[in-house]
Amino acid sequence: MGLGKKQFIKIFCLILLFLGLIVAWLAFGDRGFIHLYQMEKERKVYAERIRALEEENQRLLEQIERLRSDKAYIESEARKELGLLKENEVIYRFEEEQDRTDHGRD
């Protein structure tokens, strides 16, 4: 009652085909390994983005607190951002080295 050689080969090929389909489904299916790998990469990108945004948020909260409480900081920021001057203060602007040499040869 043994299986014939041809029947054995046929069953063996069907089992291999079935196993191949299962492996392909596990690798390439909607929830397969490749999809999971891509999702993990995407999760890491978003986690890094969240971390950077949290750092920026913390920096901005600290800046807000300083703007609310530190008059010297308010003054320095206004001077930096708006170009404001104190009374009797003069700003000197120097040309770049390249600009000076070009104008000096005319």
Image (cartoon, helix red, strand yellow):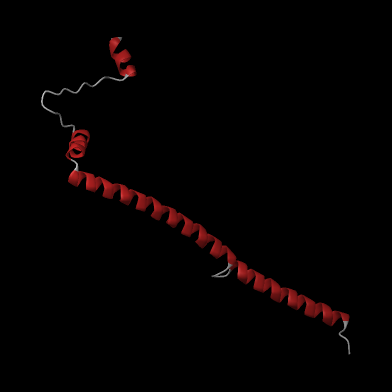
List x then y, in percent, for residue 74. Answer: 18, 39
List x then y, in percent, for residue 36. Answer: 54, 64
Tally the marks. 0
Q: Seen in the image, is 46 located left or right of residue 98?
A: right
**2 or 88: which is nearer to us?**
88
Q: Is residue 36 above or below residue 79?
A: below
List x then y, in percent, for residue 104. Answer: 29, 10
Q: Seen in the image, is 66 located left or right of residue 59?
A: left
Q: Seen in the image, is 48 located left or right of residue 81?
A: right
Q: Residue furthest top?
A: 105
**78 or 37: which is nearer to us?**
78
Q: Which residue is depicted at the point 61% across and 70% down?
A: 26
Q: Is residue 15 above or below residue 105?
A: below
Q: Which residue is depicted at the point 48% across and 58% down?
A: 42
Screen quadrant of the N terminus: bottom right
Q: Residue furthest left?
A: 87
Q: Residue furthest bottom?
A: 1
List x then y, in percent, for residue 87. Answer: 10, 26
Q: Which residue is depicted at the point 19% across and 41% down?
A: 70
Q: Which residue is depicted at the point 58% across and 68% down?
A: 32
Q: Seen in the image, is 50 located left or right of residue 92?
A: right
Screen quadrant of the C terminus: top left
Q: Is residue 40 above or below residue 15?
A: above
